[in-house]
Image: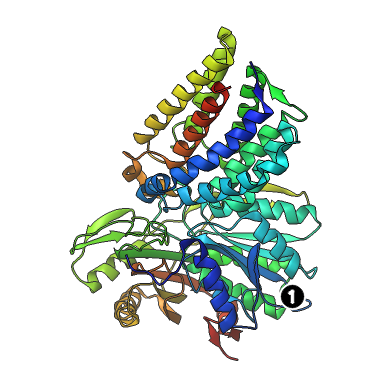
Amino acid sequence: MKKLINKIENVVKEQIEGLNLAHPELNVSLEPRYVWRDTDQGRVALLSGGGNGHEPLHAGFIGKGMLTAACPGEIFTSPTPDQMYECGHKINNDNGILFFIKNYTGDVLNFETAVEMLHADGIQVGSVLIDDDVAVKDSLYTAGRRGVAATVLIEKIVGAAAEEGYSLEQCEKLARRMNNVSRSFGVALSACVVPAAGKPSFVLEDDEIEFGVGIHGEPGIERRTYKELDSLVDQMFAELIECPPYSRELREWNRELGEWQDVEVLTEEFESDCEYIVLVNGLGGTPGSELYGAYRRLHQNCESAGYKIARNLIGNYCTSLNMEGFSITLLKADSEILRLWDAPVNTPALRWGC
Amino acid sequence: MYVKKEHILAWLKDCAAIFVEQRDFLTQLDADIGDADHGLNMNRGFERVAEKVPSMEKQDIGTIMKTTGMTLLSSVGGASGPLYGTFYIRAAGVVVGKEKLTLEEMVNMLSAGVEGVVSRGKANIGDKTMCDVWWPVVDAGNVAIEQGFTLEKALELMVQAAEEGVIATIEMQAKKGRASYLGKRSIGHQDPGATSSMMMVQSLQRIVSAG
């Protein structure tokens, strides 16, 4: 299978070197691997990370008004604690560091270890666990809902808050609230090819789609028959709005006691007549034109359900290598959220107002 | 008969060789129900461990196990990095200063490692994880102690338990990790983490019985 890569072992390193050449305003450490920008004094530092293969997430969102740093792992593999630990020390300016963690077993275990290590060095660390993927119904028999495309919106909004001077506590609270007002749902028309595997992770017939996929090339919650775009968007929209409040136990770091605490957290209800930020996100192998086709139908769905689209973002932001497919994210907004959304942002992959 | 320090070092090197050989097989198991990286990650982690073996030759078993754990923690990634890292670090805690281990001490060491894995990953019996191999392995070791078996015989029984544990994961529905998102579709597939754990137990048995 043809891939634009050289040696598999060097894929991530070479891509990060390329990013750095294109954006010399970012700094790169190769061993351990992390990307950062010089921190603003008096601002909370925002550190994200996860497996590679979701570009532009996360390194593409480093810049004024968004992230301070990102730790890229191998392809679809979470970064290791030493990356977040060293990166945390590099960007620490005594205003605290907020970790953005997508809910995957590997990410959670590695980030939690790094939180403990930084805490032991006297650094104030906060964390938000993002789990917006409503395709996963329960947390009892699974590792819980996955963190997917809402991550982009949450990093943007909290990035603006940090830029405005929100404290670590305020940023953390805001990030957790954003997570509880976000829902995403994804579908795949074809699988992606992980370079190390060298072949598609699954094969679909011409009239089949994987319904409810994450961002790691895995199959979805079920295989459905595909007819045409509009009915697919209708099915996705139904999944997004017809989901009851989701209660799960999340581990939150107690900075005073220096320990993890299990906290029962409930998502917020979605109502009509509220304003929403809408993200139609390509998974890497879908043309931008088709995403607009999907947005057209989504807009019709929102109108008939009384959901007001206050802002929209359409494009490839949280991808799954070359997977053909897309996801829809709805984030219930208020005036504070919209103000933060509209604030200037200047990163390689998201840029406005500057 | 003892598990000597030299056995532990040889075991780590042998694991590195196994994960070169089995890299693609483990990755394929992971492609079926996970994200197709387990073989690659184990290969990378144990390659780093093997590089450190020469510098560990003068250390005691506790230090060797701890260094191994820290190395895996910073090189494997994914869920298996912190889990295997924790396994070795917690195992190290009960063999500090030791140059050789009796059967009882070895089983005790593995048991401490498994407890560490459970406290991090919170797996339950039948969740289709590496613990579905480690629990029966430790149980077999404890039975062997009770029965007064030799170290060699005990390790044979532990390998048998590991192999049966892996087979048992095939019919399980994953409740932890990325495979859990597949629900019932995870049934019928052998768990990659359980498989790499089994390979480690097989290797330990081979090395120790070779003398």
Which of the two residues, A262 or B173, is positioned nearer the viewer here?
B173
Q: Is residue A262 visible?
A: no
Q: Is residue A263 left or right of residue A294?
A: right
Q: Is residue B110 above or below residue A224?
A: above
Which of the two residues, A20 or B120, is positioned nearer the viewer here?
A20
Which of the two residues, B73 or B125, is positioned nearer the viewer here?
B73
- Of the 4 image quadrants, the one containing the C terminus of chain B is top right
Q: Identity of the amino acid at label 1?
A: Arg
Asked which secondary structure carries label 1, the reply is: loop
Picture quarter containing residue A352? bottom right
Which of the two residues, A151 or B211, is positioned nearer the viewer here?
B211
Give the total of numbered labels: 1
Relative image position of residue A137 (x, y in whole percent): 40, 51
Q: Is residue A114 visible?
A: yes
Q: Is residue B167 left or right of residue A351?
A: left
Q: Is residue A129 left or right of residue B161?
A: right
Picture quarter containing residue A3? bottom left
Q: Is residue B149 left or right of residue A324?
A: right
Relative image position of residue A237 (x, y in whole percent): 33, 67
User: Which residue position holds label 1?
Assistant: A43
Label 1 Cα crowd, 10 Å radius (few <14 / some 14-19 / many 20+): many
Q: Chain of mark 1?
A: A
Q: Residue at x 41, y 26 (%)?
A: B164
Q: Residue at x 54, y 14 (%)?
A: B143
Relative image position of residue A324 (x, y in whole percent): 32, 69
Relative image position of residue A155 (x, y in whole percent): 58, 72
Q: Residue at x 79, y 71 (%)?
A: A93
